[in-house]
Amino acid sequence: MIWNILMIVAILAVVLVVAFYFLQKWSGKKAAEQQEMVKQHKQTVSIYVIDKKKDKITNAGFPKAVADQIPRRAKILKTPLVKAKIGPQIMTLVCDQAVFDALPLKKTVSVEVAGAYIVGMKGMKTKLEMQEMRNSRRKTGEETEKKGFFSKFKR
């Protein structure tokens, strides 16, 4: 009796592993196709970043035609959104996570855009480089001794 249950569980585990393998293979092909489309359609644009936040795409204010094409799973998840001025227009753009971390607020930057999706940024630093910059700023701040207002009069 126990052996029968163990055999059923083992067969189900094997079936699940095989199903996940083929599902991952299929989604990998689909992602590669999408990356190829993005590479074909990307253009370099200069934008002024007004605001950036993580929010649901449904709250971004995209037109109904665009909102209908978004998959259900993406409507639920919070995605990086950037409100930017491109020429005379103010638009909300979806952003890649690595680019979102590196985008400065209230500055004009040159980015690579494919439709309403920010793919890359010119001169973008990686997360590690940005962390090193922050650490070096802190170290230089610690080396210089802060003097308060009344410390001048104590001498």
Image (tube, rainbow, N blue to C red):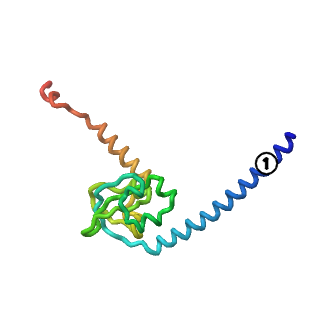
- Tell me the residue at 42%/72% (across/down): 42
Q: Name the residue under label 1.
A: 10
Quadrant of the snapshot with the N terminus: top right
Q: Residue furthest top?
A: 154
Give how far across and how far down residue 29 sits, in percent: 60, 67
Q: Which residue lies furthest to the left in this view?
A: 153
Residue lying at the far bottom of the rendered structure: 40
Binning the other alpha carbons within 10 Å of mark 1 as few (below 14), some (14 to 19) or many (20 upward) gives few
Residue 47, how many percent across, how many down?
Answer: 30, 65
* Above/below status of 121 relative to 146: below
Q: Toward which corner of the image does residue 81 lie, by quadrant?
A: bottom left
Which residue sits at x=41%, y=65%? 117
Residue 57 position, x and y percent, is 42, 57
Name the residue located 44 percent from the left edge and 50 percent from the top edge: 128
Question: Which of 103/118 is in front?
Answer: 118
Q: Is residue 64 left or right of residue 36?
A: left
x and y, in percent, of residue 133 in the image: 36, 49
In which quadrant is the C terminus drawn?
A: top left
Q: How many marks?
A: 1
Q: What residue type is labelled 1?
A: Ala
Q: What element carries label 1?
A: helix
